[in-house]
Image (cartoon, grey):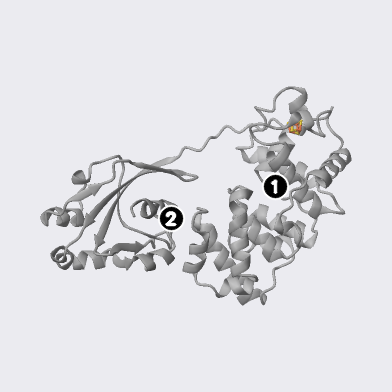
Amino acid sequence: MTINHSVFRDLLLSWYKVSQRFLPWRTTTDPYKIWLSEIILQQTRVAQGLPYYERFITQYPTVIALAKATEQEVLRMWQGLGYYSRARNLHSCAQTIVEQYNGIFPSNYQALLKLRGIGPYTAAAIAAVSFKEVVAAVDGNVYRVLARIFGLTEDIGTAYGRKQIHQLATILVDQIQPDTYSQAIMDFGALQCTPALPLCSTCVFQLYCIAFQTNRQKTLPIKTNKLNKKKRYFDYLVIRYKNTLYMTKRTSNDIWKGMYDFYLLESKCRLELDQINDPLVALVQKHNIRINTAKKEERHLLTHQSLFVRFHTIEANQSFLKDGEDLLNAYTLHPFNQMEIEILPKPILIQNFLKNSH
Ligand code: SF4
């Protein structure tokens, strides 16, 4: 028996009354705080995102304060959350709101959608929670909950499958309290109808849930196109001189743009360092400088990429630095002492290397 829409809403809202999570952004309708929490929580668990949210709000209590920060400061605050383009977009969006909207968030879904880094889900979440607009915020939680309860078998990896759920989600939004409804369905997906182990035995939808009735919790929602991750092989040459390390700011449109790392050699497959034809490595060899290669290859997983990373450290001497001056400049490699490195924004991979190499 498919559940009636108003019964669905009633059950969900009454579940939320007793089971909701108490989170700092739940006690406000300030679009700045809602936006910040949504951006931080994209692909991040609440437990991990919460301290970041609190640090951001303390450091930048308003969108104006965030807009005034430098990109480097924002990246440094974001360090460890990954997906650094989100931090850059967050900062750029704050500046747009200050410059073009007088520091006031646009108050509807369509206008929010025009802002950098704000996609359909985030725009809908802000519009519903801050401005009570009747609009469906649909993310992975909502796909899962609706596919299971309504027994939807279209592949959510396809545009058609997603559209089907969007249409249903839009019909289901509560007309009077879209804000509470939106938070309720998020919490229900995060706490009760979880991906791997849904708590069916205590679920208010048991009687109606098609997945439960037909024992298909494990197979719904259907998603066939699994991500094929690209493999990348990184060799970092870490140049140490006295108490400094040579680092460079990443400027290309690749992962970690705006953050700092070491001299990077990238290959299509795993090669030994002396198999890589590189002028800086050749210079190290010419100066007979010992290369200290870390025993363990690090594996670092990103959404669309798997990185296989090795670190090679060298202790540079003056003649090497003099001989390599032009090369180091060409690669924008500059020496930083420990205190300077501390405040640079760095990918977590680099941060961990630094922590372990002390
Ligand atoms: S019965 Fe189980 S699968 Fe169905 S909505 Fe509840 S928790 Fe999810």
In the picture of the structure, the residue carrying the numbered disc 2 is: 347
Q: Residues within 10 Å of mark 1 (few under 14, many from 20)?
A: many
Q: Nearer the viewer, residue 161 or 87?
A: 87
Q: Is mark 1 within 8 Å of ligand 1?
A: no
Q: Is there any visible trace of residue 163 in the rendered image?
A: no
Q: Position of residue 232 (x, y in %)?
A: 36, 44
Q: Quadrant of ligand 1?
A: top right
Q: CA distance from mark 2 to mark 1?
A: 30 Å
Q: Which mark is residue 138?
A: 1
Compared to residue 97, the image places residue 28 above or below, namely above
Of helix, strand and loop, which one carries label 1?
loop
Q: Is residue 22 above or below residue 270?
A: below
The quarter holding residue 94 reads bottom right
Q: Residue at x 82, y 34 (%)?
A: 204
Position of residue 192 measured from the top left corner of the image (x, y, whole percent)? 73, 37
* Residue ID at (43%, 55%): 347
Residues under numbered marks 2 and 1 in contact, where contact means CB atoms less than 8 Å apart: no
Residues 154 and 54: in front is: 54
Give the image location of residue 41, x and y in percent.
62, 52
At a point 77% along the width and 41% down the height, the residue shown is: 168
Report the amino acid beneath label 1.
Val
Residue at x 29% of width, y 62% of height:
245
Instruction: First in sequence, mark 2 or 1: give its number.
Output: 1
Marker disc for residue 308: none
Disc 2 residue crowd, few under 14, some 14–19, many 20+, Cα 10 Å = many
User: Which is more foreground, mark 2 or mark 1?
Assistant: 2
Along the horizontal axis of the image, is 356 left or right of 180? left
